[in-house]
Image: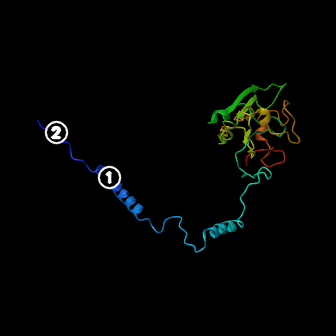
Amino acid sequence: MSEPTPPPPTEPTSGASPARREGTAIARQSSAAPSSTAPGKRSSWLPGPAQGFGVTFATMFKKVTTEEYPEVPKQTKPRYHGRHVLNRHPDGLEKCVGCELCAWACPADAIYVEGGDNTEDARFSPGERYGAVYQINYLRCIFCGLCIEACPTRSLTMSNDFELADDDRQALIYTKEQLMAPLLPGMEQPPHPMRLGESEQDYYVRAPQPGSAAEPVVGERA
Ligand code: SF4
Ligand code: SF4
């Protein structure tokens, strides 16, 4: 009984597509005969060192783009998304009503809000509620601005301040005290009674127009 005959050897490229076979052929051809127009080949008659110093010399007269930060602070665009600000009404009461809409809108879960009830003895905002606890975790924040779009009272806005680096993780969780806008002339530190009217609506219906002297604009985004 005779041994079974092994199948004849096949071409290694027999299963490859026509395009692949064509690419392989081109690669072999180019490795055998390098092109005279290979990238990086200089055609100048100057020696190499002279060409190199020519580039250096020409660069000396170009506009310098080096940032002298932090000696010269960087000027951001007017609508740059930087550190958040919790704004105040013209009498100093807080605009935040503790509704948590900003926290729900945040895709990074960076905001924590706890609302509290205003009383006639301790009033922090014109309405029924105020933001008793407010924190933003800048380890999570991606500065997308969705929180300020969600805020119904324009309490939360973003400033141009970008200097938020720190080597302490705890220090990058900003508290309400750090986020509150400073008191401008004519403002009074809460808690205090409503100075601009009898009801909450007086703070919005008869509120000063943006840009007027009484409108607090510290840190507000344009
Ligand atoms: S800017 Fe974006 S990521 Fe940062 S707190 Fe607001 S919603 Fe969250
Ligand atoms: S900042 Fe605005 S959205 Fe956030 S809790 Fe205060 S009022 Fe509501």
Q: Position of residue 181 (x, y in %)?
A: 80, 39
Residue at image position (79%, 42%) is 207
Determine the secondary structure under disc 1: loop
Q: Where does the image place residue 212, in percent across and percent down from the top left?
A: 82, 48
Please name the amino acid that badge 1 sits on: Ser
The local crowd at label 1, few if under 14, some if 14 to 19, many if 20 or more residues have their Cα within 10 Å, is few
Task: Give whichever of 67, 39 is nearer the camera.
Answer: 39
Describe the element under mark 2 as helix, strand or loop.
Answer: loop
The residue that mark 2 highlights is 4
Instruction: Give the percent coordinates (x, y) of residue 116.
Output: 75, 26
> Which of the 4 image quadrants contains residue 119?
top right
**Is residue 94 something that shows in the picture?**
no
| Residue 37 horizontal/vertical position (percent) | 48, 68
Looking at the picture, tell me which residue is in the foreground, 178 or 164: 164
- Residue occupying image coordinates x 38% and y 62%: 29
| Residue type pointed to by label 2 | Pro
Residue topped by disc 1: 17
Q: Are marks 2 and 1 in contact (CB under 8 Å)?
A: no
Relative depth, front residue between 212 and 159: 159
Q: Is residue 190 visible?
A: yes
